[in-house]
Image (tube, rainbow, N blue to C red):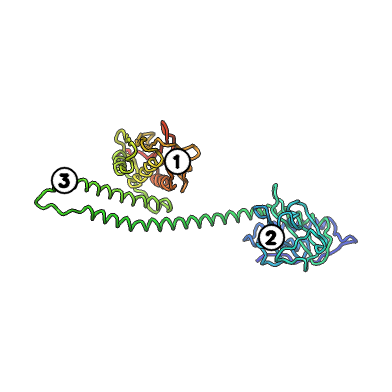
Amino acid sequence: MVTTMARPARTDDGPSGERPAAERQLEQLGFLHRVAKLATTARTWDELLETIVDETRDALQADVSSLYLLDRDGAHLTLAATNGLDRYQIGRAQVPFSEGVTGRVAATREPMRIADVRHDPRFLWVRGIDQRRFIASMLSVPLSWREGVVGVLNIQTEETREFSDSDVAQLSAIADLLAGIVEKGRTQLEAEAQVEALQAIDEARTELIAMVTHELRTPLAVVRAYTDLLSEEPPLVGRESRDLIRRRTRDEWHNRAIDQIERLDRLVDSILASVRPLEDRPSDVVPVDVAALLDEVVAGLRPLLRNHRVVVDAGVRRFALADPPRLRQVIEHLIENAVKYAPPGTTISVGTTLVEGHVRVAVSDEGPGIPPEWRERIFEPYARRDTHTARGSGIGLFAAKRLTESMAAHLWCEPAESAGARFVIALPAAVAV
């Protein structure tokens, strides 16, 4: 419900039809105070605009008041609120910038008063609003905010009226008061709409990724089952295998295949971790033998590393507080990232150091390196820095960052000693094991 004043009858106090200046100023101040209060307490954007046009019409003793807002591209002014024209046209009726009375006022940022629009060539008929049928006179003022124009505020009368200087001053004062309120409200509305749109996109992305990764579980389980079947051989009863080397090789291949299937399972977990809160699965932090874990990860990734030289330098045996499965995933992501961006034949180095009570695990490559302006961006979701060497998906480093932070650890990127990039994980050192 919009609160408005009852529209008083226009009164004349003298031969000139003007009331005493003090009375006019007092009435104008009271009106501006009332409009400011109503405008700032409006519950919705529509209620705010309705309040503006209703109070403006009543204060100027007019028949119609309309508010047009300048579109963000500056090409048109769109009807935002009215109390006398066809309300269906709100949000639809448009006036080109610098055309018609409204468009000219926006362009010049100067008030314009028209005694009889029916005989004034500057008046522009707007499709859907046949104002010429009942509008006689019109006063328009710009809503200026800072260095630009927000829109135009119009009042119109059904009978011919000569708008006075005090009418222009009063409507201009209203416009000056409302310009900032309208612009800030409009900006807030647009920001809220943008947030809602981004939330909808994020929810749709989350649902899609969750659905796809869930569907991956079934084929992975089937592949694992067939892999186990292929590895089965008749039991050796009372005899030895005629080809022990071949049997051992097949067993090794089977184990490696199972390792990669499990790695795909962990990859699915990483993708899910990138789109859902990790608080749903609290980390299980325990002392971890970092050197042993590095050896296991590198051994599992041997097929991926076949075109690179790999140097693992864990130094002395060090233990860190971490969630073993999550730390494994993080290191896998970092090594996979190095393989993608480092040219074949180059060296990928993995090592550990102890710095100020933290075990640092570093993965270095000899690739093109990462410019300073990208060293934070690469950890954002779907941030990809394409090079001639590889194209990434933008998920791996984001998931690695989130997994690291879920263990109360830190992950960052810095230049490698010679060339390329160096990713460092800092984990709290285990005091005793």
Please identify the residue farthest to the left as the structure is shown. 238
**Observer-nearest of 349 and 194:** 349
Whether residue 241 is visible = yes
The residue located at (66%, 60%) in the rendering is 48
Q: Percent x, y for residue 126?
A: 72, 63
- Distance, label 2 to label 3, CA atoms, is 85 Å
Residue 353 in the image: x percent, y percent?
35, 34
| Left or right, residue 432 beside residue 377 | left
Which residue matches tag 3?
Answer: 244
Q: Which mark is residue 365?
A: none
Residue type highlighted by circle 1: His
Please state which amino acid type lies under the numbered disc 2: Gln
Query: Where 268 sits versus 360, above or below?
Result: below
Looking at this rendering, what residue extends furthest in the bottom direction? 133
Q: Earlier in the sequence, mark 1 or mark 2?
A: 2
User: Where does the image place residue 193, in percent across and percent down from the top left?
Assistant: 57, 57
Badge 1, how many Cα within 10 Å: few under 14, some, many 20+?
few
Q: Which residue position is annotated with label 1?
A: 388
